[in-house]
Image (cartoon, rainbow, N blue to C red):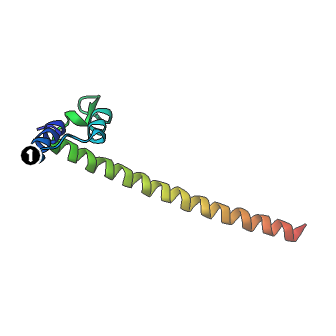
Amino acid sequence: MTLKEIVELQSIIDKRKIAKDTLNTLENNYYFSKSKNQNIKFADMHIDHFLRALKLDKQNKSQVDIQTAEVIDQLKKTLTKIKRLAGDNELEG
């Protein structure tokens, strides 16, 4: 069952129209499928695939966050060394 079908069922059960922002999200957002080598609309994704994609995206973001923190830490160390060297040069001059 796709996300679009689930939202349509919810609309029937709740006896309410589907919110426009929900429809926009489903129709205008995509997930790149590595196995199919193409973008897939959220609306066309099956719920289990969508949930896996969210998990993968979160893991990828976590890895990027870790790498970013490592780069920032290295830059802070470099900046400390530069400040120390600049301070040492000022004392010599």
**Which residue is denoted by mark 1 in the rendering?**
13
Q: Residue at x 20, y 36 (%)?
A: 45
* Quadrant in the picture for the C terminus: bottom right
Residue 38 rendering spot, x and y as whole percentages = 29, 28
Characterize the local packing of mark 1: few (<14), some (14-19) or many (20 or more) Cα atoms within 10 angstroms.
Answer: few
Q: Residue at x 55, y 62 (%)?
A: 73
Check the image and name the residue furthest to the left: 13
Q: Look at the numbered disc 1 and give the secondary structure of its residue.
A: helix
Asked where in the image residue 78 lies, by quadrant, the reply is bottom right
* Position of residue 70 in the picture relative to residue 90 (left or right): left
47 vs 90: above or below = above
- Residue placed most toward the observer, 1 or 85: 1
* Position of residue 12 in the picture relative to residue 85 (left or right): left
Q: How many marks?
A: 1
Residue 31 rendering spot, x and y as whole percentages = 30, 37
Q: Residue at x 19, y 42 (%)?
A: 49
Asked where in the image residue 11 lies, by quadrant, the reply is top left
- Residue placed most toward the observer, 66 or 27: 27
Residue 20 rendering spot, x and y as whole percentages = 28, 38
